[in-house]
Image (cartoon, helix red, strand yellow):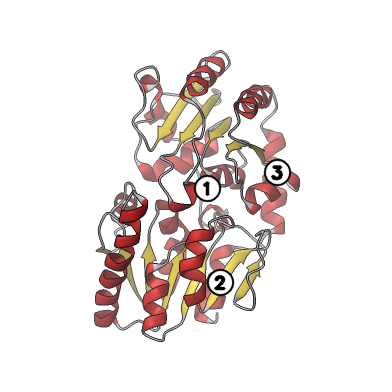
């Protein structure tokens, strides 16, 4: 089988990397088209995956509409040469549109249940839409729910083993408490209207947490002078090792909140919309704590984070073990659904 993957976000690389390795091992051919976005290309290069760069994409609403045609054309051009039997994408439309145009199966994996604009331009063209069982929306006959999370595709113990050498990069001792802050750029189409954590509360939170632990910040946007000293200087492929050893992750990224949960690290997710999967990770497993972007909730989140730092992290390790025991290996689900194995 010949499979074309289009990747639009660093997480998309992680979702499919183990599938691609296993598919290639048994003789399937894979072609990757990728957006030029940090650190997506860096991750592809680190794993020595061959790919075709389809450009940087766009940031403003109008430029996103224009790039939709550009991205589709570039993926189509690759597909006409590669001649795939099917297309696969994650929360992204380009490969789905091209698959529909060429009358080939186009499989979409989606866990961002509130991204209505993205859905409007993608769902009608998908052959099948795979969503976690906790997905908030009922899509129709195309929807296939799976009892897992996308992050398990790469953070299941079958694939991930933490490397403590990351602590040397961070200049943190084994067993020393540290908190990872994650700030996002709010430039995705489903981020319209969001502001995230205020600068005042970012600074306030960092000052509060430094009383009890070390602080590490990873940010998509330039950090203000007051916070630059806390910025993490590590290779992107080491981030999951850092999350594993962290005492807490707090921020605006749903993906990283879920990644922390898969690794047994408690996380705080601040976002007005939330996600079906972060809801389940809080309500069923107690691994994620969800807060809105209101100033009141931001302050509550800081207070909750300090409470967590005074807890035994083994509590969260046990909760994570329960989660892994109850959820399917997402990579195996993908292999079965796409390759029939």
Which SS class for mark 1?
helix
Find the residue positioned furthest to the top.
Answer: 211
Give the Cα separation between the discs numbered 1 and 3. Answer: 14 Å
Q: Report the Cα–Cα distance between label 3 and label 2.
A: 25 Å
Q: Which residue is mark 2?
A: 129
Q: Is label 1 or label 2 in front? A: 2
Disc number lying in front (3 or 2): 2
Per the image, the residue denoted by label 3 is 282
Report x, y in % for residue 286. 72, 41
* Residue depicted at 52% across the width and 16% down the height: 210
Q: Is residue 181 left or right of residue 318?
A: left
Q: Which is more N-terminal, label 2 or label 3?
A: 2
Residue at 26% across, 82% down: 80
Please tell me which residue lies in front, 4 or 141: 141
Residue 265, position as x, y percentages in the image: 60, 38
The residue where tag 1 is placed is 255
Separation (CA) of disc 1 from disc 2:
19 Å
Classify mark 2: residues with Cα within 10 Å, few (<14), some (14-19) or many (20+). Answer: many
Give the crowd class for mark 1: few <14, some 14-19, many >=20 residues within 10 Å. Answer: some
Sequence-wise, which precedes: disc 1 or disc 2?
Answer: 2
Dots 1 and 2: beta carbons under 8 Å? no
């Amino acid at each position: 089988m010949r499979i074309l993957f289009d990747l639009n976000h660093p997480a998309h690389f992680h979702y499919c990397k183990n599938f691609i390795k296993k598919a290639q091992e048994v003789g399937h051919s894979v072609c990757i088209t990728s957006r030029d976005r940090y650190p997506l290309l860096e991750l592809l290069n680190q794993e020595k995956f061959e790919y075709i760069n389809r450009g940087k994409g766009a940031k403003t609403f109008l430029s996103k509409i224009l790039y939709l045609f550009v991205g589709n054309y570039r993926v189509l051009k690759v597909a006409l040469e590669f001649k795939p039997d099917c297309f696969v994408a994650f929360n992204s439309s380009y490969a789905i549109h091209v698959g529909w145009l060429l009358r080939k199966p186009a499989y979409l994996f989606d866990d961002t249940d509130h991204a209505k604009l993205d859905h409007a331009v993608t769902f009608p063209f998908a052959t099948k839409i795979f969503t976690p069982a906790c997905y908030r929306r009922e899509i129709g006959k195309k929807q296939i729910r799976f009892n897992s999370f996308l992050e398990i595709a790469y953070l299941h113990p079958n694939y991930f083993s933490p490397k403590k050498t990351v602590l040397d990069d961070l200049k943190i001792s084994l067993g020393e408490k540290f908190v990872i802050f994650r700030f996002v750029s709010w430039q995705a189409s489903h981020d319209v209207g969001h502001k995230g954590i205020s600068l005042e509360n970012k600074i306030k939170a960092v000052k509060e947490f430094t009383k009890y632990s070390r602080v590490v910040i990873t940010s998509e946007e330039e950090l203000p002078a007051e916070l630059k000293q806390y910025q993490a200087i590590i290779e992107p492929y080491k981030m999951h090792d850092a999350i594993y050893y962290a005492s807490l992750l707090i921020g605006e990224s749903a993906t990283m909140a879920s990644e922390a949960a898969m690794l047994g690290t408690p996380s705080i997710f601040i976002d007005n919309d939330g996600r079906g999967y972060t809801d389940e990770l809080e309500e069923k497993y107690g691994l994620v704590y969800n807060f809105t972007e209101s100033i009141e909730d931001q302050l509550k989140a800081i207070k909750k984070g300090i409470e967590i730092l005074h807890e035994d992290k083994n509590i969260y390790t046990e909760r994570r073990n329960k989660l892994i025991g109850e959820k399917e290996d997402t990579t195996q689900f993908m292999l079965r659904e796409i390759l029939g194995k």
